[in-house]
Amino acid sequence: AKGQVHSLTISNLSVEDTGTFVFSVENLKTSARLVVKEPPVTILRKLESQKVPDVSVISLECELSRHNVDVRWMKDGFELKPSRDLRIYAMG
């Protein structure tokens, strides 16, 4: 508080901070809704084309601007699913 002005400061905002905040004094109150939106995801490092012998093991990697996003791997228009020879994972 500075004189008659009272403030609430929230640092390092995240989506979890979304909510209704209320300030009350005696029999009075005021409220405000805070909506924290995540920035759109961007690709920081793109996939790179590779040419390898047919007996090789390869890893295709790309890096995103944030984690905890729904991603899909596709090949020739069809979604890939994990199998004995295909591993899909995220790091970070």
Image (cartoon, rainbow, N blue to C red):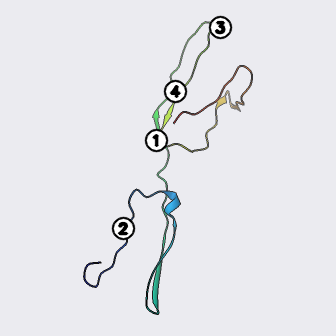
**Residue at which label 4 appears:** 47
- Residue at 49% across / 65% down in the picture? 35
Name of the residue lying farthest toward the left = 3
Front-most of residues 47 and 77: 47
- Tag on residue 54? 3
Q: Is residue 80 left or right of residue 25?
A: right
**Residue at which label 2 appears:** 9
Secondary element under disc 1, as helix, strand or loop, is loop
- Tag on residue 65? 1
The numbered mark, 1 or 2, whose residue comes first in the sequence reads 2
The numbered mark, 3 or 1, whose residue comes first in the sequence reads 3
C-alpha span from label 3 to label 1: 33 Å
Q: Residues within 10 Å of mark 3 (few under 14, many from 20)?
A: few
Residue 71 point in image, percent of width and height: 61, 39
> Where on the picture, by quarter, is residue 23?
bottom left
C-alpha span from label 2 to label 3: 58 Å
C-alpha span from label 3 to label 4: 19 Å
| Residue type, label 2 | Thr
Residue 43 point in image, percent of width and height: 48, 37
| Residue type, label 3 | Asp
> Where on the picture, by quarter, is residue 1?
bottom left
C-alpha span from label 1 to label 2: 26 Å
- Tag on residue 5? none
Front-most of residues 82 and 22: 22
Q: Is residue 92 left or right of residue 70?
A: left
Name of the residue lying farthest toward the right = 84
